[in-house]
Image: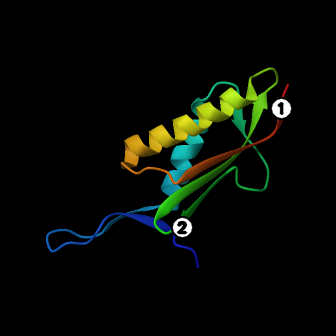
Amino acid sequence: MAQEYIVIKEKTEQSGLIALSKSVFESIAKISVEEVEGCFLVDNSKKAVVCKIINNRLHVNVEAKVKYGVNVNRTCEDIQDRITQNIQLMTNLKCGSVDVKISGFVF
């Protein structure tokens, strides 16, 4: 089974272990995508945001649609920047990678 959390602070004599579940990072990523203008999460049976934790490093995959006429490259960069900034601000953790897949347009 894959690791379901990232250790933020190791257990010491004075305090316990501090770890965050990958669902926390998925929620932060979803909120971040919704903040980008002209971008919408894919609404289907698959998860639009998937976080994987490999070797205590966070990897985020996002599948989205963009509004027709919007610059796709710039929107993808905005999504990546917003997700990495929000995760770092809220958890003080840097993402290993943020991959964005644009699967269509909204007219």
Question: Residue 28 location in percent, x, y?
Answer: 51, 45
For the C terminus, the quadrant is top right
Decide if residue 103 is on the left or right side of residue 10: right
Q: Please, is residue 20 above or below residue 103 in the view?
A: below
Which amino acid lies under the numbered mark 1 shown in the image of this protein? Phe
Decide if residue 15 is on the left or right side of residue 49: left
Q: Are marks 2 and 1 in contact (CB under 8 Å)?
A: no
Question: Residue 26 location in percent, x, y?
Answer: 56, 52
Q: Which mark is residue 105?
A: 1
Q: How dense is the environment of label 1, judged by Cα within 10 Å: few (below 14), some, or many (20 and up)?
A: some
From the image, tell me which residue sits under label 2. Answer: 54
Question: Residue 49 location in percent, x, y?
Answer: 65, 51
| Alpha carbons under labels 2 and 1: distance apart | 32 Å
Which of labels 2 and 1 is toward the front?
Answer: 2
Question: In percent of the image, x 49 and y 69: which residue is there?
Answer: 55
Question: In percent of the image, x 83 and y 32: which residue is there?
Answer: 105
Q: Please, is residue 97 above or below residue 71 in the view?
A: below
- Most extreme residue toward the bottom is 1
For the N terminus, the quadrant is bottom right
Q: Secondary structure at mark 2?
A: strand
Q: Please, is residue 85 above or below residue 53 in the view?
A: above
Decide if residue 4 is on the left or right side of residue 73: left
Question: Residue 68 location in percent, x, y?
Answer: 82, 24
Q: Quadrant of residue 15?
A: bottom left
Q: Quadrant of residue 90?
A: top left
Q: Secondary structure at mark 1?
A: strand
Disc 2 or 1, which lies upstream in sequence?
2
Which amino acid lies under the numbered mark 2 shown in the image of this protein? Ile
Q: How dense is the environment of label 2, judged by Cα within 10 Å: few (below 14), some, or many (20 and up)?
A: some
- Most extreme residue toward the top is 69
